[in-house]
Amino acid sequence: PVKVTKICCIGAGYVGGPTCAVIAVKCPQIRVTIVDLNAERIAAWNSPDYRLPIYEPGLVDVVREARGRNLFFSTDVDKGIEEADLIFVSVNTPTKKSGVGAGSAADLNYVELATRRIANVANSSKIVVEKSTVPCRTAESMRTILEANSKPNCRFDILSNPEFLAEGTAINDLFNPDRVLIGSLQTPEGKAACDALASVYANWVPTERILTVGLWSSELSKLAANAMLAQRISSINALSAICEATGANIDEVAHAIGYDSRVGPKFLKASVGFGGSCFQKDILNLVYLSESLHLPEVAAYWRQVVEMNEYQKRRFSKRVVDTLFNTITGKRIAVLGFAFKADTGDTRESAAITLIKDFQSERALINIYDPKVEHSQIWADLQEASPLVPLDSIKKQVTICSSALEACKDAEAVVIATEWKEFQEIDWETVYKKMNKPAFVFDGRLLLDADKLRRIGFKVTTIGRAAPLVQGSVPN
Ligand code: NAD
Ligand code: UDX
């Protein structure tokens, strides 16, 4: 196969950064340059004390090993493109906010701009790899743009190589992927390009885990994988509502279902709702695709996964208000966790944002603590969630705290919004003493030992469990 010696990655975000840093570590013979238009981000990747722009366990060690050896971060996009023989396009593909398909279609502007840049700059043949998550047939559009703008003697082969890493476990996911998926045209040239990329991964991924398929299957598989994962969570969350109404226990139900080897135990944890930059966006993308293909029943089926998630978040906030004697006006609520899941500083689509917005509209006072999210990010997210409210007014209602204990002081209720392990290790006896009474805990992540908290004196409400019928009694 064509031998890859220089790789460029366009987009130094949550995917491009870790993915290509791991390639550099595993393939010392390949020079990897990650480029981005965002100078601040690149400066952080290059910072001498490794204050990287994203938090991901194990990432610093990977960057420390390869940076300056065969891993480089740069704002010089053109130079990166020109030098490389293989280019990953790993730019953002958010949901469109306006125009045709607003609210569901993917905004492909960044992919197109990156593709046009490649076409304009390249003086030699390149393998162009679509790493971003994109609607089906985007590779086809990329190919048309590249071919219409290429210089003589420049060939472009397009591959689809979607990324399956999850945030918080990205490094482990990249070191030991369940599979690597590569889609290509089924022509001799397409297959040769596919072999070239496969041989990069073969430096550390067992060959039986490198799956090669057609371009469109590859693009659709990414959307389908996320849709099916999110569907599992919406299914378990729908069941959590039944548990709360009947006295069944969602953990026991999930355990019993997951024991069936056809279902499997993973990804069945009831929660306040899924968040993250991918699930909602990719399902909406699939919905839009189904609608465009005149398959309204298919579109409605997948849309329901997102609607169930919205319902779960609303249901949880309502339960907080109901339990606090139907009003939280003027009451202080401590929200522990702001990231969309543990072990990340990422807040995109975090359920915490929705919960806090609901508490704001009930005119509660909210204390927020998260171990990793920057305060400026929290303010930016809250401002974006309530664009018409001046930040000063938001700040009158919301306080960001630097420890869980500080957040819980004088609060009526604690809400667990993210499953950070450190919340299990909080000194709950001290928290209890510092809170107003009765002191309530709402565990939206099935994280805490409810019985232990009840013994301290807390009134505990857990997702997927009925409220105790008699105050102080322990539910099943
Ligand atoms: P991100 O926003 O963190 O990073 C994208 C980066 O691309 C930004 O830093 C931006 O400045 C840069 N960029 C945009 N246009 C550019 C251009 N023309 N030239 C140079 N740089 C440019 O996004 P992300 O979370 O890394 O996601 C990237 C893609 O990967 C998306 O399509 C996403 O759906 C997909 N994906 C994300 C995850 C995840 O867990 N975050 C997992 C799998 C797949
Ligand atoms: C997801 C996919 O897992 C990954 O394969 C894809 O590449 C990108 O999208 P990510 O969004 O980073 O990854 O995290 P994930 O672990 O999937 O969690 C998504 C959301 O679902 C989080 O808010 C998480 O808390 C929630 N979740 C997950 C549950 O509520 N219950 C579960 O059982 C699992």
Image (tube, grey):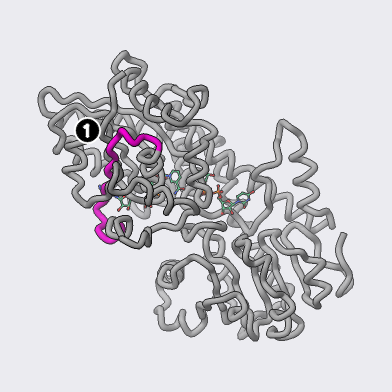
Q: Quadrant of the N terminus?
A: top left
Q: Is residue 132 visible?
A: no
The reply, left or right, for residue 207 in relation to residue 246 is left
Provide the residue span drawn in magenta. 26-41
Q: Position of residue 57 (x, y in %)?
A: 50, 53
Q: Say which residue appears at 31% left-offset and 13% top-offset.
A: 188
The reply, left or right, for residue 346 in relation to residue 265 is left
Which one is in front, 343 or 325? 343
Residue 40 among those drawn in magenta: yes
Q: Quadrant of the C terminus?
A: bottom right
Q: Position of residue 224 (x, y in %)?
A: 52, 35
Q: Quadrant of residue 352?
A: bottom right
Location of residue 14 with respect to 136 vertically, above or below = below
Give amino acid for label 1.
Ile
Helix, strand or loop at mark 1:
helix
Which one is in front, 389 or 191? 191
Q: Say which residue appears at 60% left-offset and 75% top-offset.
A: 404
Residue 416 among those drawn in magenta: no
Q: Which residue is mark 1?
A: 145
Location of residue 290 with respect to 344 vertically, above or below = above
In the image, farthest residue toward the top: 188
Location of residue 439 with respect to 374 vertically, above or below = below
Which one is in front, 31 or 82? 31
How many labels, in total?
1
Q: Position of residue 75 (x, y in %)?
A: 22, 52
The reply, left or right, for residue 241 in relation to residue 150 is right
Q: Say which residue appears at 72% left-offset and 75% top-offset.
A: 428
Q: Say which residue appears at 45% left-offset and 29% top-offset.
A: 181
Rate crowding at label 1 as few (under 14), some (14 to 19) or many (20 or more) other CA atoms within 10 Å.
some
Question: Mark 1 near ligand 1 (CB under 8 Å)?
Answer: no
